[in-house]
Amino acid sequence: MRAIQVASYGSPLLLTELPAPVAGPDQEVLDVVYASVNPLDIWVSRGNFAGVTPQPHTPGVEGVGRRADGSAVIISGVGIANAGTYAQQVVVSPANVFDVPDGVDLRQAAAVTVAGITAWMCVHSMGDVGPNDVVLVLGATGGVGAVALQLARNAGATVIGQTSSPDKASAIAGAGARAIVAPTAADLAAALEGTAPTLVVEGLGGAFTGACVDLVAPAGRIVNFGTSSDTAVSFDMRTFYRKGTRLLGYGGLILTPAQRTQAYASLLADIAAGRLSVPIDDVLPLDQAGEAHRRILAKEVTGKLLLDPNL
């Protein structure tokens, strides 16, 4: 089968021919229809999980596949300690698959996986969003941000989406949110024009988290799911505690199966009903996996990138 291999941590992503995988006890082999490309794939390929990631390695933590009977499933939770979805076939265990209902577009199902669950958990489970909320989504044109905008809007909240690029503002407006352009954390206050969000969903970290502590409304919530700007965060503790701010961290690696099932069921129902559409920036052939990683690192992507292993 065709698959992407990373020979050693940080080395190029190369298309190669590998033997077809063989299922072990309580496993099955799936044909991969689409592999979803995530920042996590990049960090795995660079050795951030070196203690468990083998070399050589096939990346890809998620995607959509078909069983031997033709039924479609979401694939999730592979590609770190075992071979991933950047291949024509992948071995999965029962915990790695979730049935895709009839009528759900498979590209949408592939795009909504990690990004969709992250957005759902940040907005609903941790953010507890409601119609009285003013929600600020940082990085609103990324995979998580684009879904978070729609989930907050569907809950009846007033939604504001931040981007660093004026060219991407129209995508935020198209999702029914107010767009603000703030390339740096220092630009946020002016861009918000005095609006104090009650909930902030952000995956930037660094100075942006500190700015959110300053700008969030009293008793507001900040849910962080990443540090693409910087891992070092500082803010004034007096501002933090005097406003009764809640700073919450989300990490997908500690999700329970029940939480994952609840999020998938809700997201796929929204897609089937037309309430949610995940922006898909591009679908690339498998040998362009390295280009997909480059685009993510260069912040050139609006929404999600997918790989088609059969192209």
Image (tube, rainbow, N blue to C red):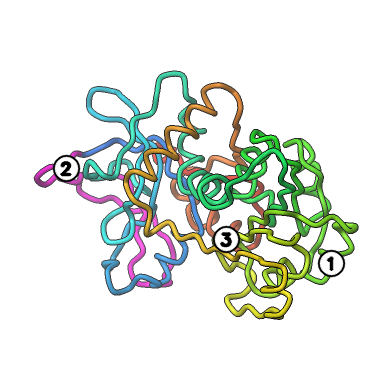
Answer left or right for 268 relative to 47.
right
Name the residue at 12% across, 42% down. Answer: 26
Q: Nearer the viewer, residue 79 or 22?
A: 79
Q: Residue furthest top?
A: 103
Q: Which label is found at residue 43?
A: none
Q: Is residue 124 above or below residue 206?
A: above
Q: Is residue 126 above or below residue 52?
A: above
In x, y percent, where is residue 165?
A: 79, 56
**How far apart are the alpha carbons under marks 1 and 3?**
27 Å
Name the residue at 54% across, 28% down. Answer: 270
Q: Can you identify the residue that label 1 sits on?
A: 187
Query: Along the polypeptide, which appears first: circle 1 or circle 3?
Result: 1
Query: Along the polypeptide, which appears first: circle 3 or circle 2?
Result: 2
Magenta stretch bounds: 1-28
Q: Can you identify the residue that label 2 sits on?
A: 27
Name the residue at 46% across, 19% down. Answer: 103
Q: Which label is found at residue 294?
A: 3
Mark 3: amino acid: Arg
